[in-house]
Amino acid sequence: MNMIANIRSVDARESVFSRLDVLVARRPPSPDAARVEARQLVSMAIADSCQADSLWGAVDAFHAHFDFMMQTIEINGADDRGLKILRTKCRFYLEQVEAMCLSLSY
């Protein structure tokens, strides 16, 4: 099953970030469930032609920060002050993934 989708419009781009916000807000039942959903978000941000090592580095960084954010929520709750920084980092790496994919598609 191909789970890779191109992000070509502002609507799709905002959809990815909206889904990230919803994912964090609703707190998946387990870290594994959160990881699966996070990987789907990254798949939405990856274009068909992406093969670069730097892309996968950004993907790995996104997942590492996302996992840490989910662990922080599990331990400290959703009101933890450090979550804002982690959300910002997740968004940054997801934007990097998207930017690299877009640059590879030209």
Image (tube, rainbow, N blue to C red):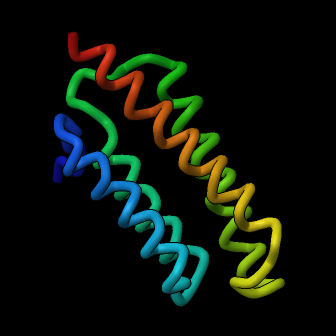
Q: Quadrant of residue 9?
A: top left
Residue 8 or residue 6, whichever sits in front: 8
* Residue occupying the far front of the picture: 10
The location of residue 27, given as percent across then percent down, is 55, 84
Which residue lies at the image location 71% right of the left edge and 57% below the top edge? 86
Left or right, 19 with reference to 24: left
Q: Is residue 35 above or below residue 22?
A: above
Residue 53 or residue 81, whichever sits in front: 81
Left or right, 96 with reference to 4: right
Left or right, 77 with reference to 47: right
The location of residue 103, given as percent across then percent down, is 33, 15
The location of residue 68, given as percent across then percent down, is 73, 62
Which residue lies at the image location 74% right of the left edge and 84% below the top edge? 79
Q: Is residue 21 above or below residue 29?
A: above
Q: Is residue 54 above or below residue 84?
A: above
| Count of marks overlaid on the render | 0
Q: Quadrant of the C terminus?
A: top left
Which residue lies at the image location 56% right of the left edge and 33% below the top edge? 58
Residue 17 or residue 45, whichever sits in front: 17
